[in-house]
Amino acid sequence: MLNKTTKKRVAKTLKFLKSIDLNVLDLGKHIINDWLYINVQEYMTKDVSECRFESHKNYIDIQTLASGTEIIEITDSNKLEIDEEYNEEKDIMFWKSNKTAKNKKLIKEGIFAVLLPCDIHKPCVAVDGKPSKVRKLVAKIRIAK
């Protein structure tokens, strides 16, 4: 359950992302304030077998694409085992899985995926197994204590 401050941060971030031209931000990390930064990336999506499940403890992800399409698979930890232990500095843990998740979200321009710490997710998956170039923004919202 998110506290009131964190819910407000998510709402403010969504409003901010909808108000800007996502194509004009340079690649890399953009610090917006003391609880929000945005990573801008360009890459080729991959076959699902090349992607890994990940999760975070201290940040909520809001992922969207400025161009292209990709699938994000979402599952929970009782179907997976840890692949790489939690890295506190990067706020990330990786999970092993040979199966695809039943919960799949198509992400494209104008669609936002809000991923909470309980949402173990596998980003970068090619749509219909056909790799394509995407321009992605990942807003990282620090969870208020």
Image (tube, helix red, strand yellow):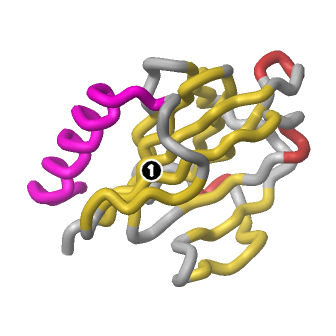
Q: Position of residue 46 (x, y in %)?
A: 85, 36
Q: Quadrant of residue 90?
A: bottom right
Q: In the figure, 37 relative to 99: above or below?
A: below
* Quadrant of the image containing the C terminus: bottom left
Identify the magenta region: 1-22
Number of residue marks: 1
Q: Dot 1, how many residues are within 10 Å of its Cα: few (below 14), some (14-19), or many (20+)?
A: many
Image coords of residue 7 (percent x, y): 18, 49
Inspect the magenta stretch and tell me whether residue 4 lies in it.
Answer: yes
Q: Is residue 15 depicted above or below 34 in this figure?
A: above
Does 49 sit left or right of 143 as displayed? right
Q: Is residue 81 left or right of residue 89?
A: right
Residue on which the image places disc 1:
61
Q: Is residue 2 magenta?
A: yes
Q: Residue at x 80, y 53 (%)?
A: 97
Q: Residue at x 26, y 37 (%)?
A: 16
Q: Measured from the top left, where is residue 25 in percent x and y?
A: 49, 41
Disc 1 element: strand
Front-most of 111 and 72? 111
Residue at 67% over, 21% down: 68
Q: Position of residue 115 (x, y in %)?
A: 44, 46
Q: Nearer the viewer, residue 70 or 98?
A: 70
Quadrant that contains the N terminus:
bottom left
Amino acid type, callout 1? Asp
Name the outermost residue toward the left: 4
Residue at image x 31%, y 26%? Answer: 18
In this orientation, which residue lies closer to the viewer: 5 or 22?
A: 22
Main SS of the magenta part reads helix
